[in-house]
Image (tube, rainbow, N blue to C red):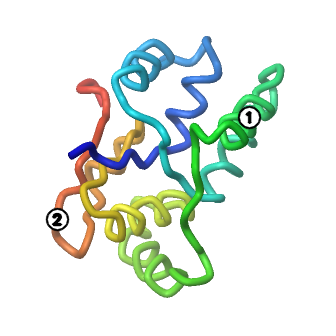
């Protein structure tokens, strides 16, 4: 059974911006994986912000949504209590809203793996104590 890929903003930025340090790694990993990738609105917002100075960067991420490469199947309204608890638990990291949503998604989606270049995901745990399966560079 294929794993469901939950994608983080750093990977999306690296896929779109060829100048990013992890562009090649992210591209190589993405080519091995089966889309669609799932994410949340917070990640899309963060990605668009980070790509604000990249020519057509925001268009590229929105096109990924439009083309079905990325899908959003997550409701912040439904999960806000759990996300607030996660953000409180990891306030020393600190955990962003986007990261909180992705950790919660990893709890909700069976057989999922988080595709990220964010080392904080090595710290976060799902369902209290379980390591989150990751696709992450070894150097991070």
Q: Which residue is at 48% across, 58% downward?
A: 99
Residue 74: numbered disc = none
- In the image, 134 versus 1, the foreground residue is 1
Image x and y of residue 8, in percent:
49, 44
Provide the residue designation for mark 1. Answer: 63
CB-based contact (under 8 Å), mark 1 and mark 2: no
Q: Nearer the viewer, mark 1 or mark 2?
A: 1
Q: Which residue is at 21% across, 46% downward?
A: 1
Residue 21, compared with residue 73, is above or below; it is above
Q: Which residue is at 62% across, 82% downward?
A: 77
- In the image, 128 versus 112, the foreground residue is 112
Outermost residue on the front side: it is: 1
Callout 2 crowding tier (Cα within 10 Å): few <14, some 14–19, many ≥20: few
Provide the residue designation for mark 2. Answer: 130
Image x and y of residue 51, in percent:
73, 32
Callout 1 crowding tier (Cα within 10 Å): few <14, some 14–19, many ≥20: few
Number of labels in the image equals: 2
- In the image, 125 versus 40, the foreground residue is 40
Tag 1 secondary structure: helix
Image x and y of residue 20, in percent:
56, 18
Q: Is residue 45 left or right of residue 12?
A: right
Image x and y of residue 112, in percent:
30, 53
Residue 11, compared with residue 26, is above or below; it is below
The picture quadrant where one finds residue 34 is top left
Residue 70, compared with residue 91, is above or below; it is above
Q: Is residue 103 left or right of residue 63?
A: left
Q: Mark 1 and mark 2: span between their CA atoms? A: 34 Å
Q: Is residue 19 left or right of residue 85?
A: right
Q: Which residue is at 42% across, 49% downward?
A: 6
Is tag 1's residue or tag 2's residue first in the polypeptide sequence? Answer: 1
Q: Is residue 64 left or right of residue 70?
A: right
Tag 2 secondary structure: strand
């Amino acid at each position: 059974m294929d794993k469901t890929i939950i994608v983080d903003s750093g990977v999306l930025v690296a896929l779109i911006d060829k100048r990013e340090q992890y562009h090649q790694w992210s591209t190589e990993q993405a080519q091995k994986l089966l889309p669609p990738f799932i994410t949340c609105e917070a990640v899309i917002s963060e990605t668009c912000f980070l790509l604000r100075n990249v020519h057509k960067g925001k268009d590229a991420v929105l096109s990924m949504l439009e083309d079905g490469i990325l899908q959003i199947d997550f409701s912040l309204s439904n999960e806000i209590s759990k996300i607030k608890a996660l953000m409180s638990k990891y306030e020393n990291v600190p955990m962003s809203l986007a990261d909180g949503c992705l950790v919660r998604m990893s709890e909700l989606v069976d057989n999922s793996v988080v595709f990220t270049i964010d080392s904080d995901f090595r710290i976060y745990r799902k369902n209290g104590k379980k390591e989150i399966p990751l696709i992450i560079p070894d150097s991070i």
